Image (cartoon, rainbow, N blue to C red):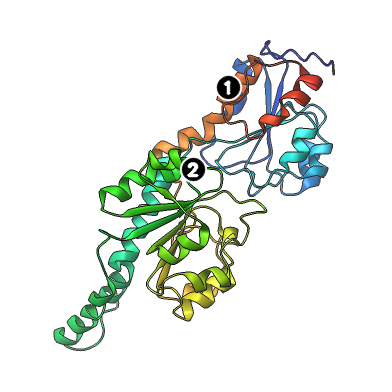
Amino acid sequence: MEKAWALRRATDFKVVSVIQRPGMPDYSEIFQRMGGSFFGQECRTEKELVQVAHDADFIITHTRSRPIGADVIHGLENCKAILGIGIGYDGVDVEAATRHGICVVNNPDYCLQEVSDHAMALILACSRGIVQIDNTVRSRPTGSDVVFSQEVKKLYYKVDTLRGKTLGIIGFGRTSRRLAPKALALGMKLIAFDPHVKNDDAANWKVELVGLTDLLSESDFVLVQAALNPETRHLLSADQFKIMKPSAFLINTARGAIVDENALYTALAGGLIAGAGLDVTEIEPLQPNSPLIALDNVILTGHSAHASKTSWAKLWYNPVEQIARVLRGEWPTGLVNPEVKENFAERWGKMR
């Protein structure tokens, strides 16, 4: 292919989706109207992915469930951009893509309100013992109303108000910034750990930046809302749970692998921490034999925090918008690897 690929001419390009999911729009019609072609096939192995997408100009994928490593990237002959439908991009070898002049693009504005709402719901549910009380009411013990009432009242002493409590946020990015006003409105104090955020920026959201150890020791609720990468994998393990308050709750609406699940189980079963609200787990879907299922101080929501009628449109149509930008010679708004620009220009032509 010529070095000066016709970026500004929206014709003669190929888009391949290596995932096929319910709710996906008719990409064939969309890209045909734009002057290109589309092919979609569920690819479950790296070999299948290379076979299907080796000559694609753009690849649409779900990076967590369809990893694209260096070997796959090496086999992509024409690829200008790998487009993840969601926020995460931990399944793509970004360094390899950058070396090959390939843009890695995520969906940075997707489901921010939904996930922040869900995190707040888990915090409230843990604080008020909603699930435990519901389970007690549903599984009414045999006996009189007096016995039943006593069983419910036992849980009264485990619930509390959020006002005055400290919420420690690990990762103060876009989703956390949607959550901050909601937590502040309920009277919570906010602290955060994020090496990539400046003090002044956090202060604008009425959040104090602290070290991880201080966050864990001071927080009544620890919210994990960071990206998964080599630095954050198992960031929270046995040593970290020992630092947390026995009355504290862990909330994870980010990536399961940021938390060492075996260590978490030990902490929950042994009373090192009070409980957890987990939307994500290391293995998804959560397996029936997971020991977490047997614990009554854990809320499990099966990676549903992103879901809403509103979010689906953003999920599926963002790749179309980003491809259109590249075809116009503009950088994608969700460009994960801005350092690719020099290699991209050298291989495919300049962008603006």
- In the rendered image, is residue 284 in sight? no
Q: Would you place residue 156 above or below residue 337 in this image?
A: below
In percent of width and height, residue 231 lies at: 65, 54
Q: Name, please, the residue furthest toward the top.
A: 9
**Relative horizontal placement of residue 11, taking residue 208 as reference (left or right):** right
Instruction: Tell me how far mark 1 sits from mark 2, CA to CA.
Output: 32 Å
Q: Name the residue: 47% across, 75% down.
A: 268
- Residue designated by label 1: 30
Q: Name the residue: 48% across, 81% down.
A: 270
- Residue designated by label 2: 173
Q: Would you place residue 204 above or below residue 10 in this image?
A: below
In percent of width and height, residue 213 lies at: 51, 63
**Relative horizontal placement of residue 99, taking residue 109 as reference (left or right):** right
Dot 2 falls on a residue whose secondary structure is: loop
**Relative horizontal placement of residue 209, taking residue 260 as reference (left or right):** left
Q: Name the residue: 63% across, 35% down.
A: 336
In percent of width and height, residue 134 lies at: 28, 70
Q: In the rendered image, which quarter contains the C terminus?
A: top right
- In the rendered image, is residue 179 in sight? yes
Q: Name the residue: 31% across, 47% down.
A: 182
